Amino acid sequence: MRSAAEFCDECCTPIPAPEDIAEFKQVTVLFADVVRSMDIALALDFEQLHHIMTELAERSTEVVNRFGGSAAEFTGGGVMAIFGAPTAAEGHGIQACLAALEIQDEAKRLAVEFARRYGVAPRLGVGLNSGRAPVGAMRSGPIGCATPAEPVGSAQRMESVSPGGGVMLSESTARLVERDAVLGAPRRVQFQGCDAPVVVRRLLGVNAS
């Protein structure tokens, strides 16, 4: 097979371009979304809701970038971020934890402003999950990482059980950061579609270094 060939000489199978071959890296995925967003939507007009969701997404993205992550906004104001890709980072887990706590601080400050202006005080739920994700196929949006469904889905599940204003970690993320973070007691949650209960832990803080 020739190095620059587009098809295999023996079987005629298309040869993927070098940039299409994904490299797997260990990452931590952060997912944040507004708790009970439908209730907020019913209480506001479109422009007010758009302003709130945009502000939350932009502030969250700024925090993610500050802590070395890559963020992409999802429909509805939810924000997903990846730490450890496309540039590898050994401390991706604790970086994600620091970002998650700062996102909550920003959201609480914004909630005071929104309560004064619009009469609603939205709260965010944040979930973190760590695992392997393919990078190198830079075709899936601004985060530049073709994230598989499972790591992202697990982060979303963590967010779904996070109390408003809180951050929930999967067991994989908790193991990564347990020496540097303050964690709540493990508890088991049965998620729809999962055969067995899943261990989750709440992030309470990060130890001063």
Image: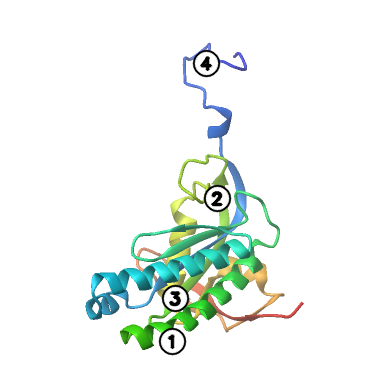
Above/below status of 170 relative to 123: above
Above/below status of 31 relative to 206: above
At label 2, counting other C-alpha atoms closer than 10 Å, the crowd grade (few under 14, some 14-19, many 20 or more) is many
At label 1, which amino acid type do we have? Val
Near-viewer residue (203 or 45)? 45
Measure the C-alpha gap from mark 3 to mark 4. Answer: 49 Å
**Which is nearer the N-term, disc 3 or disc 4?**
4
Q: Which mark is residue 125?
A: 3
Is the N terminus in the top left, top right, bottom left or bottom right quadrant?
A: top right
Measure the C-alpha gap from mark 1 to mark 3. Answer: 17 Å
At label 4, counting other C-alpha atoms closer than 10 Å, the crowd grade (few under 14, some 14-19, many 20 or more) is few
Quarter assignment of residue 119: bottom left
Quarter assignment of residue 66: bottom right
Measure the C-alpha gap from mark 4 to mark 1. Answer: 62 Å
Q: Which mark is residue 94?
A: none
At label 2, which amino acid type do we have? Ala
Residue linked to disc 1? 112
Residue linked to disc 4? 8
**Which is nearer the N-term, disc 4 or disc 1?**
4
